[in-house]
Image (cartoon, rainbow, N blue to C red):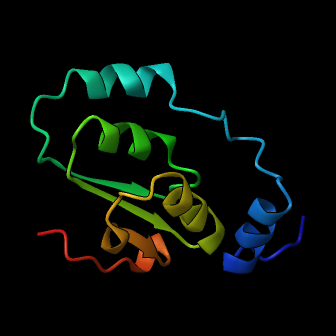
Amino acid sequence: MNQEINAGYWQQRYQSGQTGWDVGGITTPLKEYFDQLENKDLRILIPGCGNAYEAEYLFLCGFTQVYLVDVAEEPLLNFAHRVPGFPKEQLLHQDFFKCRTSMT
């Protein structure tokens, strides 16, 4: 496979529905881990967030400092549509390896 994997590559995968890694919801191990967290003000960064079902779960459970990063815009747009109350400034459309955020 001699294919450059960049933002365009990931954008195309989301737009064409080629997301075989996407289980369609939060996984049990993450849910169980999140359920034992008491501090809802923890700063949580989810790099390469994809459809970010875990971020949706955290947000609905009252976590306020969840940040999503993805190099592809499509999953961030999908998430914003699915979870309209989520703070837009915490959706970061950028390369995680060059990530700049105001997580202070």
Above or below residue 29? Residue 86 is below
Looking at the figure, which quarter contains the C terminus? bottom left
Residue drawn at the location 85% of the way across and 73% of the way down: 3
Q: Is residue 23 left or right of residue 46?
A: right
Measured from the top left, where is residue 13 in percent x and y? 79, 62
Q: What residue appears at the point 65 percent right and 68 percent down from the top-left corner?
A: 74
Looking at the picture, how far across and down is residue 69, in whole percent?
44, 66
Residue 8, located in which quarter of the rendered image? bottom right
Q: Residue furthest front?
A: 84
Q: How many marks?
A: 0
Quadrant containing the N terminus is bottom right
Relative to 94, is 87 on the left or the right?
Answer: left
Residue 29 visible somewhere in the drawing: yes
Residue 72 visible in the current orientation: no
Q: Residue at x 42, y 44 (%)?
A: 56
Foreground residue among 61 and 48: 61
Is 16 positioned to the left or the right of 54 in the image? right
Q: Is residue 53 left or right of residue 98?
A: right
Front in this rendered view, residue 93 or 9: 93
Residue 12: give x, y in percent of width and height: 80, 70
- Please say if 91 is above or below 51: below
Rendering coords of residue 63 (x, y %): 22, 44
User: Which residue is pictured at 66% across the width and 33% down the height?
Assistant: 23
Q: Quadrant of residue 50?
A: bottom right
